Amino acid sequence: MWKRKDENYRRAVMACFIQAAYLLELDRQENRTEQKALAPKWWVPFKFKLIETLIDERDGTIFGAMLEWDRTAAMADLILIRPTSAPRAVLTLRGTILTSSTIKRDLQDDLRFLAWETLKGSVRFKTAFDAMKSIAIRYGSGNVCIAGHSLGAGFALQVGKALAKEGIYIEAHLFNPPSVSLAASLKNIGEKATFAWKKVRAMLPSGGDVQGMTDDQNAVQDVSLKKWIPHLYINNNDYVCCYYTDPSKIVEGNNANLAAAKLFVLSKGNQKFLEAHKLDQWWADDLELQTVINSSKLISQQLKSLYQLPTSHLVSPGTQMTARFFIAAVEQ
């Protein structure tokens, strides 16, 4: 139940809601009945209800959930008015699940981001965008939130930015969001690995129907970036998201030309990657996080990549044919 306005409590609740999105898919895979389902346990205590599941049309898996304030359940507990700190609706997006039912499409979208640093070409982007825009128009942008973990945080980041471009500014909570392409990460591994990745990337489809922008469109986007400030939850030991705290990419103070984000940084010594990347670290309500609003070159780069691909990302017709052959082979 929503009792407090503090950011720690809100962060913990959002993490719980994302866990529900994971469990909705796992409940589906295990054919759990309504009585045995695990997912509802993660929204019912907060007086929310499930109003929509987001389905990947490619394989029928659940990748997200729309939760809404449950007035009936609240009234039953003599909560007559929705707390002002509680949103009317929350869209949550899960990350990758490595099971036979989900691994194929999840990894396909992971590779899409690693290759092109954008997820707009995925069917999940459009589904999530349409769902979020609909609920924002219904309840007002100030009464809704979007939240995601890992790959889901990548989608949430770009859905939020796409809405900001249309003047719809929603609250966003992004846990362990992917921060850089694999190509950048491979710089520390060696030239051979980087060369191998470039060959694989040449076979992958482009980032989607992304087109260059005019100067006027760029100016409009820059204004959007200044008005929308997502919440990013980063663990410094998680190489998927740690680049957001890279000192070389952070500009101290306000910078009119860069996007900003509210970073919540968790440092726990030398953790293993899987521990640093997990969701359950974020629903504890006693975490000691470093909080700062940063203007960041990386944040600007990630948000702008939704709409604009560098020339180097364009592929020739011959490469496009190779990419189609590769995807067709993968999908067999």
Image (cartoon, helix red, strand yellow):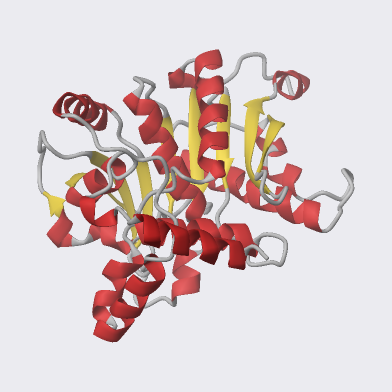
The residue sitting at 45% across, 31% down in the picture is 5
Total labels: the figure holds 0
Answer yes or no: is residue 190 visible: no
Question: Which residue appears at 21% of the width and 30% of the height?
Answer: 226
* Residue 21 drawn at (x, y percent): 64, 46
On the image, the x and y values in percent for residue 104 come to 62, 63
- For image coordinates 57% across by 29% down, the residue present is 131
Residue 289 percent coordinates (x, y): 34, 54
User: Residue 315 sits in which quadrant?
Assistant: bottom left
Locate residue 164, reporting x and y percent. Answer: 35, 27
Q: Which of 266/242 is in front?
A: 242
Residue 312 visible, this orientation: yes
Q: Nearer the viewer, residue 45 or 19?
A: 19
Q: State the quadrant of the N terminus.
A: top right
Closest to the observer: 283 or 34?
A: 34
Q: Is residue 127 above or below residue 24?
A: above
Name the residue at the front extreme. 318
Position of residue 163 relative to residue 191, above or below, is above
- Decide if residue 113 is on the left or right side of residue 222: right
Identify the image quadrant of the C terminus. Answer: bottom right
| Left or right of 26 in this view: 95 | left
Residue in the image at 30% along x and 35% along y:
229
290 and 133: which one is in front? 133
User: Would you place residue 67 above or below residue 14 in this image?
Assistant: above
Q: Is residue 200 left or right of residue 265?
A: right
